[in-house]
Amino acid sequence: MKNLFYLVCFISLLLFSCEKEKEENKTSTFADTRDGKVYECITVNGKTWFAENFSYQPPVAKSSAFNKNMSEPDIIDYSDGDIHFKLYKWNIISTIIPDGWHLPSEAEYDELIQSLGGYNVAGNKLKAKGVWEGLGKETDEIGFSALPGSIDESGLNQGFLYTHFWTSTSVDDNNAKALTIWYGGPEINITSNSKEKYYCVRFVKNN
């Protein structure tokens, strides 16, 4: 009888843990009323994140494929095979954030990374499956689905090799923190980068 009691308690605890995990990692969607685009979202550790790169085009901003012979726009269109989204300079982001959301800080990205085991392993756990070059060990553990997509300073497409996400953490007038994931390993890092670079954008829902 005593063993049966312990077994019932164990099963109840297991079911509770599974239900809690399911609740913590639930999926949802957000529709941007400005252009009708619908974004997949995930909830992790009580925070709801975009699970897709932001792609809003404000009417007043220039947008173009990168062309080093033209004046540089604030937004550029990134396209490589089936991957399509926009890359943004840091300074324009604050003007186009949808109501009820915010650009995640370095601390918020750090919290997400630590929950996945830290900077040495979180990169592979955030990568979308089947699109990155390299060892093919991406697991997309929480459904963040980070896609490769980057433009270097000369305007060259870096292919399925890197991705960068802006944070809201400003370092000084010219630089801000950004998160980088690369194709060649499981690592991830957050470093200071020029606000003039074109990087991906994800948002976190306001509490």
Image (spheres, rainbow, N blue to C red):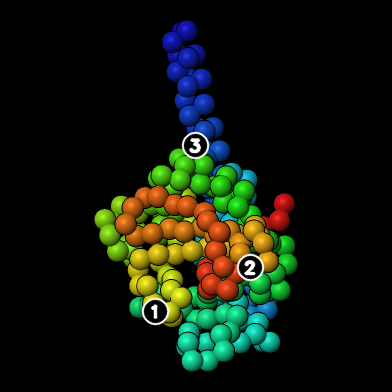
Q: Residue at x 61, y 64 (%)?
A: 175
Marked residue nearer the N-terminal end (1 or 3)? 3
Across and down, in percent, residue 1 comes to 46, 8
Sort mark 2 into few (<14), some (14-19) or many (20+) by Cα contacts within 10 Å: few
Q: Which mark is residue 18?
A: 3
Location of mark 2 (residue): 174
Q: Secondary structure at mark 3?
A: helix
Q: Which residue type carries mark 1? A: Leu
Q: Position of residue 183 (x, y in %)?
A: 34, 60
Mark 1 → mark 3, Cα distance in angstroms: 45 Å
Of the pair 132 and 32, the residue shown nearer to us: 132
The numbered mark, 2 or 3, whose residue comes first in the sequence reads 3
Depth check: give the residue in front, 130 or 192: 192
What's the residue at 51%, 42% (across, down)? Answer: 114
Looking at the image, residue 34 lies above or below residue 192:
below
Asked whether 168 or 32 is in front, the reply is: 168
Residue 141 shows up from this direction: no
At label 3, which amino acid type do we have?
Answer: Cys
Whether residue 73 is visible: yes
Residue depicted at x 52% and y 54%: 190
